[in-house]
Image: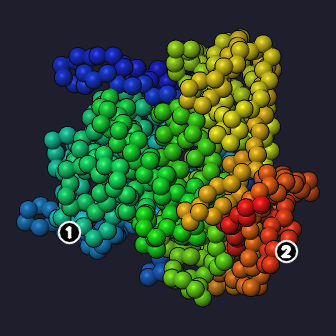
Amino acid sequence: MSEEPRRDALRWSCVFAAAVLVATGGRLSAAKREAEAFAPVRLGHVKPRGWLRDVQARDLTTGYAGHLDELLQDPQTEKYLLRRENNDFVTRANNRGCRCDERGLATPPAPRTWWHAEMIGDWHDGLLRAAYLAGGARAKAKADRFIEAILKSQDGDGYIGIYPAGCRFHFAQPDGELWSQRCVLLPLLAYYELAGREDVLEAVQRAVKLTIAQYGPGKKNYFDTPKQRDCGISHGLMFLDVLEWLYRLTGDEAYRRAALSFYEDYNAARNVLVKDGQLERLLDPSIPFSGHGPDVMGFLRVTLLCYYLSGKEVYLKAWRNAIGKVERHLGVGGSPLSGHGEEIKAEGQKPDMPYEYCSTFYLLHSLIWALQKTGEARFGDMIERTLFNAAQGARFADGKALTYYSADERLWVRQRPPEGRGNHRFIYTAAFYPSCCHDSGARVYPYTISAMWMRSRGRDGDGLVAALYGPSHVRTEINGTRVSVVEETDYPFSFEIGLSMQVERPIAFPLRLRVPAWSPEPSVTAPGAAVTRDRRGFLVVTKRWQSCDRVRLTLKPTIRGERSVDGRTAVAYGPLVFSLPIPEKAEVVQRFPPVGPDRVGGFCAYQYDPADLASARRPLKLMGGKPGFGFRVVEDDTTDPRYPWDRPRLGLRGTMLGAGGQLERVTLLPMGSTLLRRTFFAASEN
């Protein structure tokens, strides 16, 4: 047996052994646990092709994502936070002033000394994933150096983190212990899968076993630390990301028990600031979300994980309630509507309400878990909606800038707009302190690309799952046989998807193809295959596959309306929401010096105003009585297929009702290709 199936057997032992009653001296729960619907494909075994590869490669070479270490400065110290000499995981510089009291409890020298560690870990997470997926020797070299520095910094007891010896694990004041560890251990685990370094996995396990020994079952409740003034403690619940990954890789029961224990401690904590993920609140569907957006969106996946780890139906009920709640908070673009303090808003929602990029990314991350663990196709729809609209619409198409706060509809991108509340984070820039949202922007595509293909388990045998669509190449093993599939498509700018199979030897297995809700009756051509439909929203194509076998899937979108929170309508086609672009005038508020050995330039910070405010505000109504509101799909064949967001291939052209009932010809473009935009309109009755 080759290395990958051996690892997969180990990964799945924890899932399928738990599907039966077990009795091993009390070490395992006797509950009958559900098997997860799908399994992730090993990182690096799904690679982007076509426009996905080209956009990622450009982000690394000329975009901010590949150069943030040369762009991001601490405004107080003017240090470049992401450079090697300022790597706080190695230097622990921010916490050199830690002191312990007579009880042996440590106090960090200042609030938020974990901030830099978050920025360092999260940016490298996106950098190394993109570098190993799309290529990029310089980015890969930066990632390699980071990993080596972390490994070299690991203490003899296994500790990886930002606090000095003697000032770890037991604090008198709020800290970022679990969160900062999570932010560096995730890129280490990603590096293990991408580069195949067993020593990296061993280093992570040593670090995590040490942390479990301090905060695990029967130990101190980390989340109940008093005097919490920020979300550093709340963030720590997402240490479960690391525990889930290690349990999946190794089947070690210590990680399962620790994950359940950490959530139990979080539920029992009364001092923790963000309580939205506590079981008691989730079991009451009438309580809306109101906490810090990234935490709330990240916490979504915790009860889902606990259900699959324990089999307890109460966690499944809480998970279902959580998804129901989040859907009440989503804008049309797929991101949760936020307040200006990054909180998820329930009151006073408006279609132009801003949302924060980290909330967008952490929602997308949770939805990837939901798709993988439940196998429900609708979560794939939600992922694509979030990625292609809210996430893409908050960045420059060329990757040179991103806005911390964005909105589905906006007449200004300005820190002090002429109307409404100001927000110093509402600006397009190549670097912003803190860089959390820029780090998230560097991760959305790498995370989504790795989730495009999954592996299924079920009564019909092992198989492959086309979970998300886009040009890609997957290679894996099914029942000990090497299999690869090339997906050729320009999705979401076209809806023809071709799959070409290569197999080591003829092999029968089911190939699942997600059926989007906006294309309920797709057509599939697969000579010699049986095609059925499962209850979770997938076409199941089964045959004895041979090399050069092909499958063609044709999705059939129609122009449709999406209702906004105030009752107006946005126009959508496939996974894309379309907006009326508003001609803008730019103000450059900062210019960054060229970076890298090639002296890459063009990095700036911008604010935008409409070129003509009166025109931007002119009255327009959709033709409500016409199919597709009177719009038709138009294609621009002169666009560059490598960079489809720069000038989109697809548009919607039609007529709208203007002032005095006058007809006006307009062309709507994908939200992800616009800066200033109008997205929501009233609809006429005829």
* Disc ID at residue 528: none
User: Residue 554: where, in percent of width, then height?
Assistant: 78, 34
Farthest bottom residue in view: 418
What colouring style does the render use? Answer: rainbow
Give the residue displayed 49% in from the left and 24% down from the top: 8
Q: Quadrant of residue 98?
A: bottom left
- Inspect the image, locate mark 2, and give the three-letter code of the amino acid beneath it: Gln
Give the residue displayed 37% in from the left and 58% down from the top: 288
Nearer to us: label 2 or label 1: 2
Provide the residue designation for mark 1. Answer: 227
- Inspect the image, locate mark 1, and give the three-letter code of the amino acid beneath it: Lys
Task: Count neighbours of disc 2 (C-alpha within 10 A) and say few if under 14, some if 14 to 19, many if 20 or more.
Answer: few
Give the residue displayed 82% in from the left and 61% down from the top: 647
Left or right: where does residue 463 sit relative to residue 581? left
Secondary structure of the residue carrying tag 1 is: loop
Provide the residue designation for mark 2. Answer: 662
Task: Count neighbours of disc 1 (C-alpha within 10 A) and say few if under 14, some if 14 to 19, many if 20 or more.
Answer: few
- Quadrant of the rendering where the C terminus is positioned: bottom right
User: Residue 6: where, in percent of width, then height?
Assistant: 49, 20
User: Residue 508: where, in percent of width, then height?
Assistant: 66, 12
Give the answer, above or below, for where 465 lies relative to 88.
above
Front in this rendered view, residue 628 or 613: 628
Name which of mark 2 and mark 1 comes first in the sequence: 1
Q: Quadrant of residue 226?
A: bottom left
| Residue 356 visible at all | no
Farthest left residue in view: 102
Farthest front residue in view: 686
Give the residue displayed 49% in from the left and 27% down from the top: 37
Left or right: where does residue 358 sit relative to residue 343? right
Give the answer, above or below, for where 452 lies relative to 1.
below
Front in this rendered view, residue 119 or 648: 648
User: Residue 344: where, in percent of width, then height?
Assistant: 43, 63
